[in-house]
Amino acid sequence: MNKKEPVGVYIHVPFCDGKCPYCDFYSLYGNDKLIDEYTQTVSKVMAKSSEKWNRTADTLYFGGGTPNLLGQERLSFLIKTAKEKFGLENAEITVEVNPAEDLSGFLEEIKKAGANRLSIGLQSANEDELKLLGRRHTVKQAEKAVKDAQNAGFKNISLDLMLAIQKQTKESLLRSINFCAEMGVQHISAYLLKIEPKTLYYRKRDKLDVPNDDEAAELYLTACEELEKRGFMQYEISNFAKPGFESRHNLKYWDCKEYIGIGPAAHSFMDGKRFYYNRDIKGFMHDEEPALDGKGGSFEEYAMLKLRLCSGLDNEDCRKRFNMDIPERILKAAKLYQQGGLTVCDKNGIHFTPKGFLVSNMLISEILFSK
Amino acid sequence: MSIPRDRVRNFSIIAHIDHGKSTLADRILEQTKAVAVRDMENQLLDNMDLERERGITIKAHAVTLVYTAKDGNDYVFNLIDTPGHVDFNYEVSRSLAACEGAVLVVDASQGIEAQTLANTYLAVDAGLEIVPVVNKIDLPSAQPEKAKEEIEDIIGIPADEAPCVSAKLGTNIDLVMEQIVKNVPPPQGDEKEPLQALIFDSYYDAYKGVIIHVRIKNGQVHPGDEIRMMATGAEFTVVECGFCRATCLEKSEGLFAGEVGYIAASIKEVKQARVGDTVTLADNPAKVPLPGYRSVQPMVFCGIYPADGAKYPDLRDALEKLQLNDAALSYEPETSVALGFGFRCGFLGLLHMEIIQERLEREYNLDIITTAPSVVYKITKTNGEVVCIDNPTNYPDPALIEQAEEPMTNAHIYAPSDYVGNIMELCQDRRGTFKDMNYIDTDRVDIHYELPLNEIIYDFFDALKSRTRGYASFDYELSGYQKSSLVKLDIMLNGEVVDALSFIIHADKAYPRARKMAEKLAEKIPRQLFEVPIQACIGGRIIARETVKAMRKDVLAKCYGGDITRKKKLLEKQKEGKKRMRQLGTVEVPQEAFMSVLKLDE
């Protein structure tokens, strides 16, 4: 791999005003003092990382949690620090925001500081679904957030949708999709709900009225089809974009490229090794080093990530990176599933269809571990 | 040993499972001070873990003891243990042939059971003096007088002198000892005749080679003698001989007519010193061998495969080692499309098969897959050729079969009369032919059926126990072959026949069994990436069908903050899971699926 290639930088903002019942990401309630100290630590760690790796970056991503809880000043300060330390020339700078807040002033400020992409947690454009998800915003608020962002000059906006949630039907899903299309955004992430251990949803999982696997599969396929009809082309299992608006930062994950993650629970992949910070803000703020998570970038790992993309595993990239074509046994195994409409195999390589994505865990293991 | 022959007593103990054979043996050992009480591991004679767990003796063991009787004389007691299961009938008969007497243990609360009866008849047939003992008199439900009556009525031997004992508490054991002295006759035989020694057991010792347990009927044997096995013709030089004491081997100058002891002669395999064979001297052989020798024929066969194909050499080594000690076990390599390389193994019966499977798993730490057990069918082809088939894979094309025959058994079931209805229903269902029924006493019966062996080998005993709340006991012997209407049933997964799941079955039983198997497989085979049809067929005709639906959703939608570790772990878990699966064509089948179709009644 070309060591000079710019990396991605991910900043985790582990603060939320409340916990969504389905969410197992690391977040906690933050008061001003804690948020101040946290901002300082992140800035310090950025300096340290930059010294350690001595690399430039071309994507910066603030994820959460709720990054807008940092407020415009702290966020602008962190963008400024990042620019100093990692260059960020022609960079994609994304901030995740929650539409429960009035963001008009905030958005203008961070735009000035350099943010150029927003990811807004819409989840659904149906009030009853939002309530059941425990979201603290209404459809109206989400609509206002998108308009505020557009007014502030953001030309690359992504909306999050959730699939296979309580009350969701094909019709209600179509309403959410239409809402996104009508708002004129450039990118949509549509995630199938997964009930994770240690969430409120998990504890009351027997009482949840969520679609079964077969219904969930139908909703997913509907989303893929309807989004494409509206010009949002699928490029990853859960991601759809107008051409040219694919998330450059997230693509680094799927392309098995390098990235530096900063903050509790953030992961890094640098120099062939994977690291992560523990889910512990105190440790992070007391200069705890990230833990080594073993070697990364093996062919197996690379293939597993690449197969999440619509472009799939292709010979050309494989040759570039591993100096070989896709192994024959893998091609052979992938071909077995072509007839069933799960894979497409051609001279360029292998990629999955939406039906294949739906069973990608098993499909990937079938293909990679075939004998 | 300087005790004259007229003070030698050679005897066995006959008892039903759980009636206290091993406990009584332990008490006898204590009485003769053969073992210090603190060295006693409970039930010394059953020294295989498996035996102790199942409460049965799998192999015979022998021990030489010295007892000081009330008349002030020392007596030599040779206690020869016998296996307690029908699968080992032949071994039992050879052990009994080494004795002059048998202690018959009857549970004071349960009375006489099938195995006791079968083995007692063997002992009576062998001309042994029977010493009845009523055990477990400490139990509140004990009815010793009723047990004595049963002994007199059913076996027809006087029981008024029978000691009433509690082997558990050690009550009245001395009475048993005195009865043995008084009633078991001393051995006959002539030391000056050519050597005739009966092999009643053998085992492999890593240092000495095969150790054979013998009863010297005539003549004598000493270290340095050239000996010959009269059935196999194999010759060896005696390295060592002597007596088996409770905790060690005690060397001696020689063994003489009437005595029971061991011979070590650098014998490499138990196959060369088969139970029932006669040992004689090579330069002065006996004219005739002792009667009763039979070369054992396996009656039940199944395929045994390593779960992990790479363990094939380990499985081969383990079978080789087991065979060193078990002449009745046969094996030869076979290949299955579904399971790869493995072995076709032959056993005396179902219990023998289960024991070998368990020993492979426990003692050799092997993960194995077994195929459905099969008996040996006799097929006469249209061209007149007769073939014996123990593997469904070799079953001839039905068009080429003139006649098919299956092995039959004479089976006796002993149970409280309340269960007669249930038992007859079960036997009827297993294609049994009712022969007769006798009342053993007012509330217990002996039901006699002719049953096909292949109906017994699956799960007959389990079914019998569950229909009689555990009260029934069961005994069978082969009675020959009978013409039968047989078919080969194949299972197809995704259109491909899985050879390891094929079996031969009576035509009348094919439909219900096919349906059950298809259902069970559908339950055990996890959803795959495509729909998997399960079909059961005879020839090309499909008689049952089930479907495993295709998996619809298995996806990690979000990889948060570049955390691909979780995804990798998931992948690794799936990789591990795959190892436990068998790839059959395009279908992955978990090992449990193979095992589950062997036990359809559960």
Image (spheres, coloured by chain):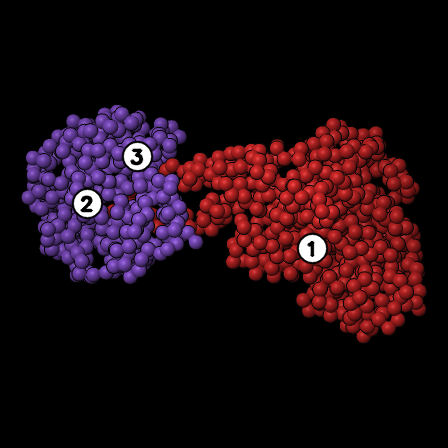
Chain colours: A purple, B red
- Residue B313 picture quarter: bottom right
Residue at image coords 78%, 56%: B295
Do dots 3 and 2 share one subunit? Answer: yes
Amino acid at circle 1: Leu
Report crowding for label 2: few under 14, some 14 to 19, many 20 or more residues within 10 A (C-alpha): some
Question: Alpha carbon of mark 1 to alpha carbon of mark 3: how far?
Answer: 58 Å
Q: Chain of mark 1?
A: B
Secondary structure state at the residue bearing disc 3: helix
Q: Which residue position is annotated with label 2?
A: A247
Where is residue A281? Give x, y as percent: 25, 48
Q: Is residue B314 above or below residue B171?
A: below
Q: Is residue A11 above or below residue B213?
A: above
Q: Nearer the viewer, residue B164 or A134?
A: A134
Give the numbered dot on residue A220.
Answer: 3
Secondary structure state at the residue bearing disc 2: loop
Give the numbered dot on residue B329.
Answer: 1
